[in-house]
Amino acid sequence: MAGQLFLLDGYAMLYRAHFAFINNPLVNSRGETTSALFGMTLQLEHLLEECRPEYLAFVFDTPKPTFRHALYPAYKATRDKMPEDMRCQIPWARQLLEEGFRIPILELEGYEADDVIGTLAHRAVEEGFEAVIVSGDKDFYQLIGEKIKIYNQRPKGEASEWVGLDNASDRMGVPAGKTVDMLSLMGDSADNVPGVRGIGKVTARKLLEKYSSLDDIYGHLEEIEPESLRKKLAESKDDAFLSRDLVTIRTNLQIGLDPETMRIKGPDKERLGELFARFEFRSLYQRFGLEQKAIEKEQGFQKVDKKYLLVDSLEMLERVVGEIRRAGRFAVDVETTGLDPVTADLVGISLSFKPHQACYIPVGHEGGPNLKLEEVQKLLGPVLKDEKIGCVGQNIKYDMIVLSRFGMEVRGVVGDPMIASYILDPGGRSHGLNALAESVLRHKMITYEEVAGRGREQKPLSKVPVKEVCEYSCEDADIALLVADKLEQRLRAEEELDRLYRSVELPLITVLARMETNGVAIDVPYLSSLSRQMEVRLAELEKRVFSLAGHEFNVNSTQQLAQVLFEELGIKPKKKTKTGYSTDSTVLAQLSAEHELPGVILELRELAKLKSTYVDALPRQVNPRTGRIHTSFNQMVTATGRLSSSNPNLQNIPIRTEEGRTIRKGFIPGAKDRVLLSADYSQIELRILAHLSGDQAMIEAFTKGMDVHTETASRLFGLRPDEVKPEHRGRAKTINFGVLYGMGAHRLSNELKIPFRVAQKFIDDYFDRFPLIRDYIERQKAAACEQGWVSTILGRRRKLPEITSSNRMTRENAERMALNTPIQGSAADLIKVAMIEVDKKLARHWPEAKMIIQVHDELVFDVPASSAEDVGEEVRSLMENAIRLKVPVKVDLGSGRNWLECK
């Protein structure tokens, strides 16, 4: 035998790769989707590694109609068009295969890839080869023979499947030779092949067990029972034979077989490296044996002479400061002993003011040499504080907090590549400097581990020799400046994004740095007492669980809980996982209607989580120097633009439960003569929905100061406002907020515990009463499909490539994002603008008033009690007028001796 010839269905592989990344597409720095290319490369690598083929070719469809379309114009008419972001990758896929991997692509106009594969497989057998068709498509089963096999490739870690004459019937239900007859009867909805109406796989298999072929079935039509089946066959006879013509793969095309052109030659490493660099497939360089220098040929960064200097004298520092003043723009990066900016010690400062030039100022190395921090403060402090000199830094908020603690305030922030990257691609995988350097500059940076060591051997930078840290730190400042310049060029090409960057996100950095530095005071004795109370309550709940179960068991074991619920108590399971029946919170909530135990378990879990996450953890996070906790506010985590907080997360403390409210009681002002002030936007997302949709009924409700949920209930149920009862208002509220998140009838029926048809009528009636909201939803979906993204009031964008997915669940999820992102994102924009304006006002008129917490639509301040009323009214005015809407914006104020009292 001459060997094995592997034939790959190229488009099938690309589709498979594209949809594998549909929920998190790969996008390079040029904004191009590369998921299909990356996934195809991984599949090819896996195939080459697992099967080690000698001969291999890709087969592609051509864009022109085939003979099947001439035979049946509706052929494949129901298929979705190829997603545009996948179509754009086809020319690159051809280059990657033909030029990079040196693998031929074969195609023939008027025929599908299946026909070309079928012909080549038969020719290969005639030439003494064994043909291997790499595909999971059942249509290829008809080609299986002694020397033709199917290889159904699976992801790494899963066993791939070989299909031959011996096991073809296991999957198809009939021997390989009857595949065409089976498909002729069943039809194929994916290709719009009609088949015999009403006959599925089971009936088709039974017919072919008794009769040898489609001809044989129709030759004995009169004897087929029952009569209903005979009637179906008779009525669809023409469709059955048409379907046979459509599904039969042609094996006699005029296309030659030249095995030598298909012999594996190995990749052209230089060209493959160039293409990988173009697509930014950094993780694949080493896997294909590509040298980094060859990869970075396109950029040539490493060929640039870098001038990184160690500042070892005050005279040299004076010259550096002069250079910065002349440049008017520089990058800064600090090296510290830890990740927490409020507690970390300063080790050194790097500065860059020209491309490929930077310097390092050591101040805290154990072995020296160091400059005295006081002297550095005197010389560098005025430059950092000068708002006329632009300062750039990667995650510069960290540097600002550290430097301010050591007497150097940063004021002239004009750039942060991390934030710029986030605005350009809020759903991007990484906005870290290393990733940005590789994607934007094609440069691989020195890693922290290369300088400080790994694992147990890792040491703080203060113990690393100065010269080693110098190169590492200088590169951080140099790259930050270079990347910022590149990304800001892209931002300037998009006016709205550039305005968002410069007017909102950059000014907000200073606000957040101040908030994190301010910190929040907590009542440690109170939380300790609350912890003891919760411990008692947890013991009571556990005792109740054991009583309901009839015996003790480990309540934290999902397996033991499942056994109690589903085996001992006989409750019907709702969902199965790989490890057994699910006992997650969603399932327990459903089961609580059937038995008391699931509800008690839910209460126990929620209380235990609050105790461990907040009540016990918060006192341990108090900074011993400041006596406060200092959360981190993150600008670039959520795709909608919302801020998040971490270490600790103050945004997840539940306010609707009694236990959550008791935790808020533990947040207090910093002194006895101070109070906490809360300013909370009222129903801001619904107000934004009214603004964006232009629905007059909703606009009127807000303009007249009516309760919007009561007004919705009045219109929905045909009642006067004074006739609306709490249950009516509650249902209207659920629908109002459900619309924001694209809630369908199924979820509404679960939320309100009403029949599906009733829920559907509620939704239909809602859109009848508020027709412009329905129009807005449809406009948003259409806009997302057309441009691939949606935007907020201030122009913040979120890419939604999956909006055109052929997968219904994926597409519907993207449609919900298309609706919710402009609303939630606009609310995020609004409060960010308000925070900037409030911060300015407080700094000028009430410097003793401190903004300390942001939780989505709420701002919390620590203010002197004597000025709380005046500060509150000014904050309310600034928040309500931050962005003008078609409806009035309302802010609810509250104050008290703890956060709970503010409500």
Image: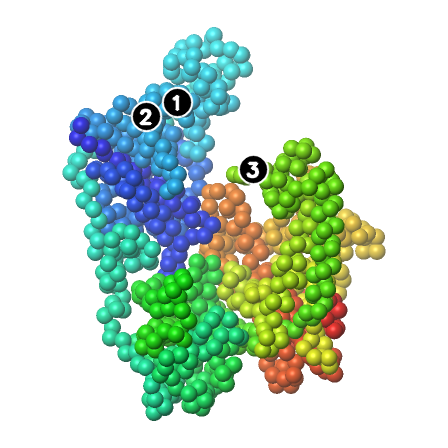
Q: Is 750 rendered above or below residue 220?
A: below
Numbered disc 3: secondary structure? strand
Q: Residue at x 19, y 32 (%)?
A: 3
Quarter of the image with the N terminus in it:
top left
Q: Residues within 10 Å of mark 1 (few under 14, many from 20)?
A: some
The residue mark sitting in front, 2 or 3, is 3
For disc 2, the marked residue is 164
Spatial CA distance of label 1 from label 2 is 9 Å
Identify the mark nearer the N-term, 3 or 1. Answer: 1
Q: Residue at x 38, y 50 (%)?
A: 35
The picture places residue 699, in percent across and down from the top left corner, at 69, 62
The residue mark sitting in front, 3 or 1, is 3
Numbered disc 1: secondary structure? helix
User: Do the CB atoms of the residues marked 2 and 3 lie less than 8 Å apart?
Assistant: no
For disc 3, the marked residue is 580
The picture places residue 687, in percent across and down from the top left corner, at 66, 62
Numbered disc 2: secondary structure? loop
Spatial CA distance of label 3 from label 1 is 31 Å
The picture places residue 128, in percent across and down from the top left corner, at 18, 27
The picture places residue 33, in percent across and down from the top left corner, at 39, 54
Q: Is 223 rendered above or below residue 139?
A: above
For disc 1, the marked residue is 169
Please state if 24 lies on the left or on the right of 888 as rendered.
Answer: left
Q: Residues within 10 Å of mark 3 (few under 14, many from 20)?
A: few
Identify the mark nearer the N-term, 1 or 2. Answer: 2
| Amino acid at the residue labelled 2 | Gly
Please state if 5 lies on the left or on the right of 728 as rendered.
Answer: left
Between 454 and 601, which is closer to the camera in this rendering?
454
| Amino acid at the residue labelled 1 | Ser
| Amino acid at the residue labelled 3 | Gly
Identify the mark nearer the N-term, 2 or 3. Answer: 2
Q: Residues within 10 Å of mark 2 (few under 14, many from 20)?
A: many
